[in-house]
Amino acid sequence: MGGLLQKKETVAELKKRLKDAAVAYVVDYRDLSVAELTTIRRDFYKNADAELTVMKNTLLKRAIEGTDMAGMEPFLSGPTALAIGRSDQVAPLKILKKFFKDNKKTNAVRGAVMDGNALAPAEVDAMASLPSLEELRGKLVGGIASPLNGIVAAISGPQRGLVNVLDQYAKQKQQQES
């Protein structure tokens, strides 16, 4: 019975973590060593406010039952790891894809659930090409700052021109006096 109680606690804990999740990716973790999984987990923790959990499909199915994450059930077959992202929805996917590419792994992200909608592998691959939240913020700030820089240059241009004219006039006067 202790095993059943532990499984119920595991399901309840996972259900809680999924409730707080912005996105969940279903990942095939075949051929990944413990050290490689640890590397991915470390990257998630440092760079993505995300976590990677290896879980039995039966427990995972119980945890998603009746939740927004229920759409991931068709992706739950074979060895499954669950990447749960809390804030940036694209960052965990980018970390996974980069790791798989850098380490020449053929592992696949089988699917995802974001905002209660299941995403097929093709949609997940399309998401991987999207910029991260930080990149989007940087582009937004750059887009806002660019016109402001132009306005500052336009406003300060005439004063700069006047200063240059006065400077040239002063130099001319000095040359005439010498």
Image (cartoon, rainbow, N blue to C red):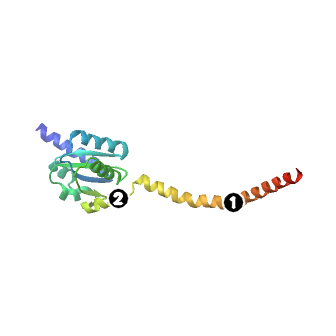
Residue sitting at 68 percent across and 60 percent down? Answer: 155
- In the picture shown, does residue 10 fall above or below 166? above
User: In x, y percent, where is residue 149?
Assistant: 60, 58
User: In x, y percent, where is residue 46?
Assistant: 36, 42
Helix, strand or loop under label 2: loop
Mark 2 or 1, nearer chain start? 2
Residue sitting at 24 percent across and 46 percent down? Answer: 14
Q: Residue furthest top?
A: 2
Count of numbered badges drawn on the protein: 2
The answer to whether residue 121 is left or right of residue 91 is: left
- Look at mark 2 in the image and give the residue it sits on: 129
Front in this rendered view, residue 30 or 67: 30
Residue type at numbered disc 2: Ser
- Disc 2 + disc 1, Cβ < 8 Å: no
The answer to whether residue 174 is left or right of residue 11 is: right
Front in this rendered view, residue 64 or 104: 104
Distance of mark 2 from mark 1, alpha carbons? 41 Å
User: In x, y percent, where is residue 90?
Assistant: 35, 54
Residue 67 visible in the displayed image: no
The answer to whether residue 63 is left or right of residue 43 is: left
Q: Residue furthest right?
A: 177
Residue type at numbered disc 1: Gly
User: In x, y percent, where is residue 97?
Assistant: 29, 52
- Look at mark 1 in the image and give the residue it sits on: 157
Front in this rendered view, residue 16 or 108: 108
Helix, strand or loop under label 1: helix
- How crowded is the residue under tag 1: few (<14 C-alpha within 10 Å), some, or many (20+)? few
Q: Quadrant of the N terminus?
A: top left
Choose top left, top right, bottom left or bottom right for residue 162.
bottom right
The answer to whether residue 146 is left or right of residue 172 is: left
Residue 59 visible in the displayed image: yes
